């Protein structure tokens, strides 16, 4: 699968669907775009949102990147958020944790994506 701006846009559209109080995984998003073995691609796309200068093609603050965790529920994306911003945002949305940085996936996992 060639990585294009359209691929990143598809990732962003899917992540925007994750409701407040829930999380999804990099792998779930990758599977939905037909790239099941490319969970890192989703991470790269979300990283672009957080590290690019304002007004770049990848700047879209409406994408809730903090709602994407690894397959174990760990907040691996937190290194791209200042301090504990990722965990704090999730807690503000009512997400609970089983460990310091591990989301309770039993109660907060979501993958009801709709392409559109």
Image (cartoon, rainbow, N blue to C red):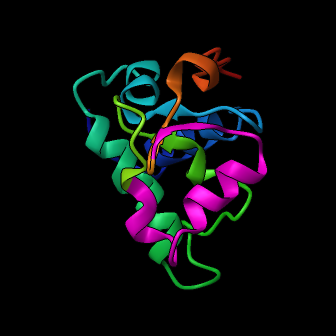
Residue farthest along the left direction in this orientation: 37
* Relative image position of residue 69 (x, y in whole percent): 44, 41
Residue at (75% x, 33% y) in the render: 19
**Above or below, 81 relative to 13:** below
Residue at (47% x, 47% y) in the render: 8
* Relative image position of residue 7 (x, y in whole percent): 44, 41
* Relative image position of residue 100 (x, y in whole percent): 45, 50
- Residue extent of the magenta highlight: 77-99
Residue farthest along the front direction in this orientation: 99
Q: Classify residue 79 by image quadrant.
A: bottom left
Split into 4 quadrants, where in the image is the N terminus? top left
Q: Left or right: 62 with respect to 5?
A: right
Relative depth, front residue between 5 and 44: 44
Q: Left or right: 40 with respect to 82?
A: left
**Above or below, 76 relative to 48:** above
Split into 4 quadrants, where in the image is the C terminus? top right
**Above or below, 39 relative to 114:** below
Q: Classify residue 15 by image quadrant.
A: top right
């Amino acid at each position: 699968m060639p990585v294009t701006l359209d691929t990143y846009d598809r990732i962003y559209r899917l992540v925007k669907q994750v409701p407040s109080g829930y999380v999804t995984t990099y792998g779930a998003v990758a599977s939905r775009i037909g790239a099941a073995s490319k969970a890192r691609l989703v991470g790269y796309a979300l990283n672009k949102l957080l590290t690019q200068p304002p007004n770049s093609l990848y700047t879209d603050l409406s994408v809730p990147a903090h709602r994407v965790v690894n397959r174990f529920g760990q907040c691996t994306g937190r290194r791209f958020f200042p301090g504990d911003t990722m965990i704090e945002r999730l807690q503000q949305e009512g997400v609970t944790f089983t460990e310091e940085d591990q989301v309770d996936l039993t109660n907060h996992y979501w993958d009801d994506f709709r392409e559109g």
